[in-house]
Amino acid sequence: MRMILVGPPGAGKGTQAARLVDLFRIPHISSGDMFRAEVKAGTELGQELDRLMKTGGLVPDDVTIPIVLKRVTQPDTAKGFMLDGFPRTRPQAEALDAAMTKAGVALDAVVLIEVPDALLEERAVMRRSDPETGKIYHLKYNPPPPDVAGRLVHRADDTKEAVTKRVTKYHSETAPIIPFYQEKGILKRVDGVGDPDAITERIKAVLES
Ligand code: ADP
Ligand code: ADP
């Protein structure tokens, strides 16, 4: 299974990806996680990424594309992968398409998780993640257990201001990849509002259809 999860910030991509990769036994490739690891490592690139990401901007295509394409050609992706957060621009979608065609493989599905803008700010601002387990929590909808509370991370770009900018960027930069995949007949739309378990079932259903 070679698939992509697309959706605005806070749509539930990371939450659903974690469940689906266990089910399909494929690697979870999150461009955001890769960039945050670089920031944490404190490299020169990491410092540049930190400045861009904090303010809700996108990392330029000429930085993003080689990093992600290198990852999707590693041996553990031979039987498939789940891309989460990439592609996020039309040039990224075209670069992925060209690389996959060259490798003689094709995407099976692009799942678009749809959530109204009005719900995204609350989802992102109250998001917390556990750096030890990688688990994603929400202070209201998926509260963390008390024993992990002390080590939870609140992302620097999960502020009201940065989320507003990221949502605007989603509409201007990322939404144009939707018709690209629609034309290929592999776009599957899923309603991302409701219980996360119900959403996993919706995704499984569209993947089987
Ligand atoms: P994304 O990767 O698309 O930005 P996440 O999976 O990190 O989204 O989810 C964003 C926040 O919303 C997290 O705090 C998560 O716990 C919460 N969340 C995820 N799915 C749902 C849902 N179906 N309903 C309510 N909150 C959700
Ligand atoms: P979310 O889960 O909220 O959608 P991500 O973790 O996927 O956020 O991404 C966080 C930030 O990392 C983005 O706002 C952007 O700055 C950067 N980023 C991640 N993936 C990409 C990408 N494919 N292209 C450009 N920037 C990216």
Image (cartoon, rainbow, N blue to C red):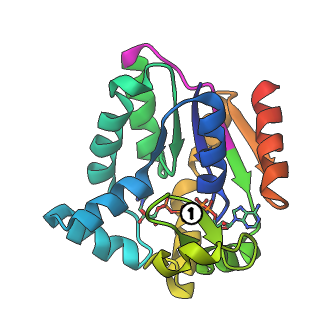
Could you tell me residue 171's position as x and y percent? 60, 63
Q: Is residue 146 above or below residue 38?
A: below
Res. 108 image quadrant = top right
- Which secondary structure lies at badge 1? helix
Q: Residue furthest front?
A: 147
Could you tell me residue 36's position as x and y percent? 36, 63
Q: Quadrant of ligand 2?
A: bottom left
On whether ligand 2 comes within 8 Å of the CB at mark 1, the answer is yes
Q: Is residue 197 above or below residue 23?
A: below
User: Is residue 110 in the magenta section?
Assistant: yes
The three-letter amino acid code for the residue at tag 1 is: Tyr
Instruction: Tell me which residue sits at (27%, 60%) in the image.
Output: 38
Residue 127 at least partly seen: no
Res. 5 image quadrant = top right
Instruction: Please tell me which residue lies in front, 67 or 87.
Output: 67
Instruction: Tell me which residue sits at (30%, 72%) in the image.
Output: 50
Q: Is residue 174 above or below residue 139?
A: above
Residue picked out by circle 1 = 170
Residue 57 at least partly seen: yes
Could you tell me residue 182's position as x and y percent? 68, 36
Bounds of the magenta segment? 103-111
Label 1, residues with CA under 10 Å away: few <14, some 14-19, many ≥20: some
Instruction: Please tell me which residue lies in front, 113 or 80.
Output: 80
Could you tell me residue 44's position as x and y percent? 14, 66
